[in-house]
Image (tube, rainbow, N blue to C red):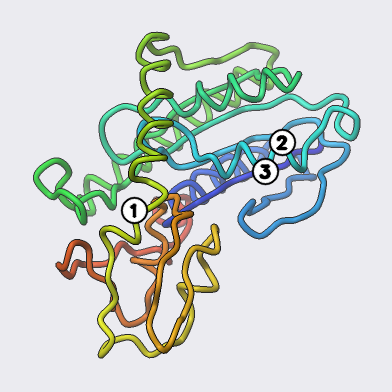
Amino acid sequence: MKTALLYFSGTGNTKRVGEVFKDYLLEKKHNEVDMIDISTHRQSLSNYDLLIAGTPTYTMTSSRNMNDFIQMYVNKTNNPKAQFITYVTHGWGHSYGHLTLQEFITKLGFRVIGAQSFLAPSNFYVYNEKVQPKQNEVEIRRLYEKITIDVKGLMDACLNGYIRIEKKSTFKKQQAKLISALSRKAFINQFSAKTLSVDGDKCTRCLVCVKKCPNKNIALIDGNIRFSKNCSACSRCMHICPQNAYAYRGKTFEQYNMNQQSISEQLK
């Protein structure tokens, strides 16, 4: 079975969950497993039997980046046998992204055999520490243990011919889609321009944030970092800056560790 693990990951959580899927498949002797970062991959996919698509949660739904990628680079003609599993990561609250992504993929004519949300370590503490305080090592380990168990349960079911869809309220899913569409136009696209700033004294003009922005939303203009209005609020720029020069609404913050080891390594 040839498998593609498609992921979009702002600060690393979704990639690390993807690695848990990959570890499971390799342990089961599925040797053809490709991990594909959709923010950099620009070629059509062909002859895959299983595609596992994962994104972070934005306003309770999946990332539009994944929808755009699948529509552009995955089609039934090149992948006639392909089935999908969808997943999302979220740091707090509820997510319906695995279901909104399932719905989108189904409309393209593919069969979705699994869909699940995973509660993961959160970087939301940067925006509102009262809603989601920064987690400690014990809390993070418990989340990783549950993710590992849940991935195994999902894959055991799907590879044995069962459909495993984590069900949630249809009404709330539709509500989340509406809120997401409205907030994207009103706020998300302008998230960085409206809320982020860069300390010119700390910034070394290394251009890491410019190069790593998945939406090409950041530019260096006249020696200063500037934002356009095509943001996805993935937070990558804030946490990848080597100098921690970014501020959110004028306040500095402790960066989320994007360079963690894989979940399996951390659980050893």
Which residue is identified by label 1? 191
CB under 8 Å between discs 3 and 2: yes
Tag in front: 1 or 2? 1
Q: Horizontal and vertical percent for residue 213? A: 50, 64
Which residue is identified by label 2? 71
Q: Residue at x 68, y 51 (%)?
A: 36
The three-letter amino acid code for the residue at tag 2 is: Gln
Q: Horizontal and vertical percent for residue 182? A: 38, 31
Q: CA distance from mark 3 to mark 2?
A: 5 Å
Which residue is identified by label 3? 69
The three-letter amino acid code for the residue at tag 1 is: Phe
Q: Residues within 10 Å of mark 2 (few under 14, many from 20)?
A: few
Q: Residue at x 72, y 17 (%)?
A: 111
- Judge left or right: residue 238 versus residue 103: left
Secondary element at tag 1: helix
Badge 1 or badge 2: first in the primary sequence: 2
Residue 245, located in which quarter of the rendered image?
bottom left
Q: Residues within 10 Å of mark 1 (few under 14, many from 20)?
A: many
The three-letter amino acid code for the residue at tag 3 is: Phe
